[in-house]
Image (cartoon, helix red, strand yellow):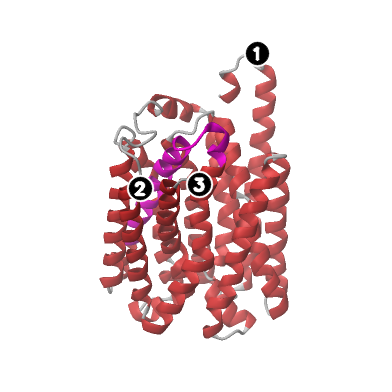
């Protein structure tokens, strides 16, 4: 794989680490900022909201900018945002800086996918994009546990300094390795990208992504207190348990992509079904450590196993791989993180019974599956009615 794509994946690794590293540090953040655990959950929620709302706005505003300085600049702003998070002692400032960092993630992902696709032959385009996503996946196996180890040993702020250092390395690597003039930055996809947003099926698919992915994060956002309170593990064991979840993410990403090439629809149905069953099993068996160890891998696998098929389905509906559409797809997943973590916080405000989170998450994912099935059925019925019109097939 070309070195410029590796540089993009390295930066994606930094951004992915920043998104989820607070989940294992919520008790520490809560104590240090003097807020409840549910309020500390906004450290995750605000990042996801920034990616969901700010990411597409950044992509829309920068469609005609050269991609190399764009992605490098986004990485540098991301670095600054994480430095502000580390230096602040206020939940409001921390949340605002996290939202800014999230917006940089959303904008970066849309541009990075466009660059990666333009650096290789069309027959290798999917693999190039997959390598960029691998940076996010691996961040959960390596970056998040390392961030949690450093955060617990030195203070939660130190985890964000680690993320800032990773972003700096990624920015330098992209500036040195990305070609000039950069690939995919001529703005030719702008009109097509905006025009496709008229598709109701596309927006319904985005909603299905947010609900399906959000169901996982109703529980996972609060996985640290869940494991210490319900499962009874020590705080020192959390890092290694989160490593199991990250291992599941890598396996799920690989398997989801493999089986999506055979049937996107069946893969989505199976993966979301596994996630629903896994969450219900976490509710029923949350106090049984061996079961929880298995379920962490299963939930991680189902969580990222849905990404390749749902991403493929959105691109199929859109008929374009523009930076704007890619950013909106990323926004949908991050919207799910925001929705799930916010709903989880609301649940905890009403009951201290952590297993309820898993039930609520399962119901949310079930709703996402139903939206997907209805969207898929309606789109295919409409496609059959206009099968002689190659443009209307994507409407």
Disc 1 or disc 3, which is closer to the eye? 3
Residue 392: x and y, percent?
A: 57, 19
- Secondary structure beneath label 3: loop
Quadrant where the C terminus sits is top right
Q: Which segment is the magenta one?
A: 97-126
Residue 195: x and y, percent?
A: 44, 25
- Residue 330 shows up from this direction: yes
Circles 2 and 3: CB atoms closer than 8 Å: no
Q: Splitting the image into 4 quarters, where does residue 353 fall?
A: bottom right
Per the image, the residue denoted by label 1 is: 388
Distance Cα–Cα, label 2 vs label 3: 13 Å
Per the image, the residue denoted by label 3 is: 1
Q: Residues within 10 Å of mark 1 (few under 14, many from 20)?
A: few
| Mark sitting on residue 133 | none
Distance Cα–Cα, label 2 vs label 1: 45 Å
Which residue does the image show at 37% across and 65% down from the upper left? 163
Which residue does the image show at 31% across and 66% down from the upper left? 94
For marks 1 and 3, the one nearer the N-term is: 3
Q: Splitting the image into 4 quarters, where does residue 37 fall?
A: bottom left
Disc 2 or disc 1, which is closer to the eye? 2
- Magenta segment's dominant SS is helix
- Secondary structure beneath label 2: helix
For marks 2 and 3, the one nearer the N-term is: 3
Q: Is residue 315 above or below residue 78?
A: above
Count of marks placed on residues? 3
Residue 384 counted in the magenta span: no
| Mark sitting on residue 177 | 2
């Amino acid at each position: 794989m070309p070195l410029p794509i590796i540089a993009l994946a390295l930066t994606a690794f930094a951004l992915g680490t920043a998104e989820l590293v607070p989940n294992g540090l919520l008790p520490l953040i809560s104590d240090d900022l003097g807020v409840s655990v549910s309020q500390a959950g906004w450290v995750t929620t605000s990042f996801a909201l920034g990616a969901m709302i700010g990411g597409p706005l950044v992509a829309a505003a920068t469609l005609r900018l050269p991609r190399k300085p764009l992605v490098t600049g986004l990485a540098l702003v991301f670095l600054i945002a994480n430095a502000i998070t580390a230096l602040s002692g206020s939940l409001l400032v921390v949340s605002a800086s996290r939202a800014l960092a999230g917006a940089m993630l959303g904008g970066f992902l849309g541009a990075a996918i466009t660059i990666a696709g333009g650096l290789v032959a069309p027959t290798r385009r999917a693999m190039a994009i997959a390598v960029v996503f691998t940076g996010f996946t691996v961040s959960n196996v390596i970056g998040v546990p390392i961030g949690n180890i450093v955060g617990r040993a030195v203070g939660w702020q130190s985890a964000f300094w680690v993320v800032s250092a990773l972003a700096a390395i990624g920015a330098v690597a992209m500036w040195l390795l990305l070609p000039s003039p950069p690939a995919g930055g001529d703005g030719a996809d702008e009109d097509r990208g905006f025009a496709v947003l008229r598709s109701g099926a596309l927006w319904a698919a985005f909603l299905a992504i947010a609900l399906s992915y959000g169901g996982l994060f109703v529980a996972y956002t609060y996985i640290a207190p869940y494991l210490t309170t319900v499962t009874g593990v020590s705080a020192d064991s959390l890092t290694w348990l989160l490593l199991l979840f990250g291992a599941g993410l890598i396996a799920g990403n690989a398997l989801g992509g493999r089986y999506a090439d055979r049937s996107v629809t069946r893969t989505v149905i199976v993966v979301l079904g596994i996630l629903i069953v896994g969450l219900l099993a976490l509710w029923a068996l949350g106090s049984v450590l061996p079961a929880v160890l298995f379920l962490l891998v299963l939930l991680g696998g189902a969580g990222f196993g849905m990404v390749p098929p749902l991403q493929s389905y959105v691109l199929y509906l859109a008929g374009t791989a523009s930076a704007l559409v890619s950013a909106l797809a990323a926004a949908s997943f991050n919207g799910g993180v925001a929705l799930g973590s916010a709903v989880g916080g609301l649940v905890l405000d009403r009951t201290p019974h952590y297993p309820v989170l898993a039930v609520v998450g399962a119901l949310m994912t079930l709703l996402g599956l139903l939206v997907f099935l209805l969207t898929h059925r309606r789109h295919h019925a409409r496609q059959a009615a206009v099968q002689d019109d190659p443009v209307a097939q994507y409407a």
